[in-house]
C-alpha cells in the first residue's frame, strides 16, 4: 500500500555492482592489491633508513653467496693443499692448518651460519609468540606457570648454560646446536611479547570482537597478534643476530660438529693449529669479520623495523 504505479521492489542482493556496498564489491584481487601496496610501503620505509639499507644489502649479499657458493668458490672446502700457505697466488687468502683453502671455507661456511641464524630465529620466535600470546591473553594458572618458567630461564646466564649442556651432549651436529640455542633464547622474547599482549588486550577493537561472539583463541591470533608484527619481527632480528655469535662461540670451543664447514669451525681449527701465536692472521680475521657482518646485518635491519613501527621516528 502507498507504492506508486511503476515502482518495482528490488530484492536484496539483486542490485548492480555499482549499487553494491563497498565490502561486497571488494574481492580477492583488491585484497591482493592492498597487500602488495602495504608490502611496498614497508619495503620503502625500510629502504629509506640508511642503516637498514646497509643491513639489507649486506644480508642480500650473504644470501647470494650462500646460494651460489659452488659457482663462486675456486675449490671444494674439503680439498686439501699444502697447510698454512700465506695469502697470494692461487690461494687468495691462504690455506688452513689442515690444508683447506681459506676462501673456499669462507664461501661454503656462509650456508651453515645463515641456516643456523634463520632456523634459530624462526623456531624461537614461533615458540616465544605462542607462549607470549597465550600466557598474556588467557592468563590464569597456565599463564602464571609460563611466566615463572620464563623468569627462571632468564635468571640463568644463557652462554654458560649452553656450554654446560653442549659438553654433556655427545651427539653434535647443526640441529643440536640450533635446539640448544632455541632452548635458552625463547624466554626473553616471550616476556616482551607477553607485555605487548597485556597492553593490546584492553583495546576497543579487541573488546568489540569479544562482544561480537568471537572465540578467545581467534581474538588472540587474529586480532591481537597482527597488531604486534613489528615487535615479532624486531625480536626475530635480535635473536638471529645473537644466534650467529652463539653458534660461532660453540664451534670455536669445540662444542659443535667439528667436521661441518662453518666460520666457527674455521676459528676452532685455526686455534688448534696455533695460528694466533704464529701470527697467521689470514686464518682468523676473515671468519671473524664474516661473523660480525652477518650479525650486524640483522641488527641494522632491526633499525628499519623500528622505523616502520614507530611513526615518531619516521617524522624525525
Image (cartoon, rainbow, N blue to C red):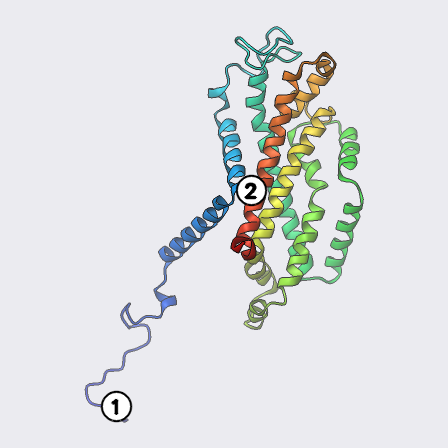
Q: How many marks?
A: 2
Q: Residue at the location (71% across, 29% down)?
A: 249
In which image quadrant can residue 5 be found?
Answer: bottom left
Q: Is residue 117 above or below residue 231?
A: above
Residue 143 appearing in the image: yes
Residue 170: % across, % down: 75, 27
- Helix, strand or loop at mark 1: loop
Front-most of residues 280 and 18: 280
Q: Nearer the viewer, mark 2 or mark 1?
A: 2
Q: Residue at the location (50% across, 15% down)?
A: 74
Point out the residue furthest to the top here: 82
Residue 57: % across, % down: 50, 35
Quadrant where the N terminus sits is bottom left
Residue hosting label 2: 301
Q: Is residue 32 above or below residue 116?
A: below
Front-most of residues 174 and 310: 310
Quadrant where the C terminus sits is bottom right
Residue 181: % across, % down: 69, 37
Marks 2 and 1, how far apart at CA: 66 Å
- Helix, strand or loop at mark 2: helix
In the picture, measured across the screen, residue 88 lies left or right of residue 245, that is left
Q: Is residue 48 above or below residue 227?
A: above
Residue hosting label 1: 3
Amino acid at each position: 500500500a502507498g507504492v506508486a504505479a511503476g515502482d518495482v521492489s528490488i530484492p536484496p542482493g539483486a542490485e548492480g555492482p555499482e549499487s553494491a556496498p563497498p565490502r561486497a564489491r571488494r574481492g580477492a584481487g583488491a585484497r591482493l592489491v592492498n597487500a602488495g601496496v602495504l608490502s611496498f610501503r614497508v619495503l620503502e620505509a625500510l629502504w629509506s633508513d640508511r642503516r637498514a639499507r646497509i643491513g639489507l644489502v649486506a644480508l642480500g649479499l650473504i644470501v647470494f653467496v650462500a646460494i651460489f657458493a659452488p659457482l663462486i668458490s675456486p675449490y671444494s672446502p674439503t680439498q686439501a693443499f699444502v697447510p698454512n700457505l700465506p695469502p697470494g697466488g692461487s690461494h687468495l687468502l691462504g690455506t688452513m692448518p689442515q690444508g683447506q683453502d681459506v676462501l673456499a671455507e669462507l664461501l661454503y661456511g656462509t650456508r651453515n651460519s645463515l641456516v643456523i641464524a634463520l632456523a634459530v630465529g624462526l623456531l624461537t620466535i614461533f615458540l616465544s609468540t605462542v607462549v607470549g600470546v597465550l600466557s598474556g591473553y588467557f592468563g590464569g594458572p597456565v599463564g602464571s606457570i609460563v611466566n615463572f618458567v620464563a623468569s627462571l630461564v632468564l635468571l640463568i646466564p644463557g652462554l654458560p648454560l649452553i656450554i654446560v649442556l653442549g659438553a654433556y651432549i655427545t651427539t653434535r651436529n647443526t640441529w643440536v646446536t640450533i635446539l640448544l640455542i632455541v632452548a635458552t633464547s625463547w624466554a626473553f622474547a616471550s616476556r616482551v611479547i607477553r607485555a605487548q599482549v597485556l597492553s593490546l588486550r584492553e583495546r576497543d577493537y579487541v573488546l568489540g570482537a569479544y562482544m561480537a561472539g568471537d572465540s578467545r583463541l581467534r581474538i588472540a591470533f587474529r586480532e591481537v597478534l597482527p597488531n604486534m608484527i613489528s615487535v615479532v619481527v624486531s625480536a626475530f632480528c635480535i635473536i638471529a643476530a645473537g644466534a650467529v655469535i652463539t653458534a660461532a662461540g660453540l664451534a670455536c670451543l669445540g662444542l659443535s660438529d667439528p667436521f661441518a664447514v662453518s666460520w666457527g669451525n674455521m676459528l676452532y681449527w685455526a686455534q688448534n693449529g696455533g695460528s694466533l701465536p704464529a701470527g697467521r692472521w689470514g686464518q682468523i680475521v676473515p671468519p671473524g669479520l664474516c661473523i660480525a657482518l652477518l650479525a650486524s646485518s640483522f641488527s641494522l635491519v632491526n633499525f628499519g623495523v623500528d622505523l616502520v613501527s614507530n611513526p615518531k621516528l619516521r617524522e624525525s
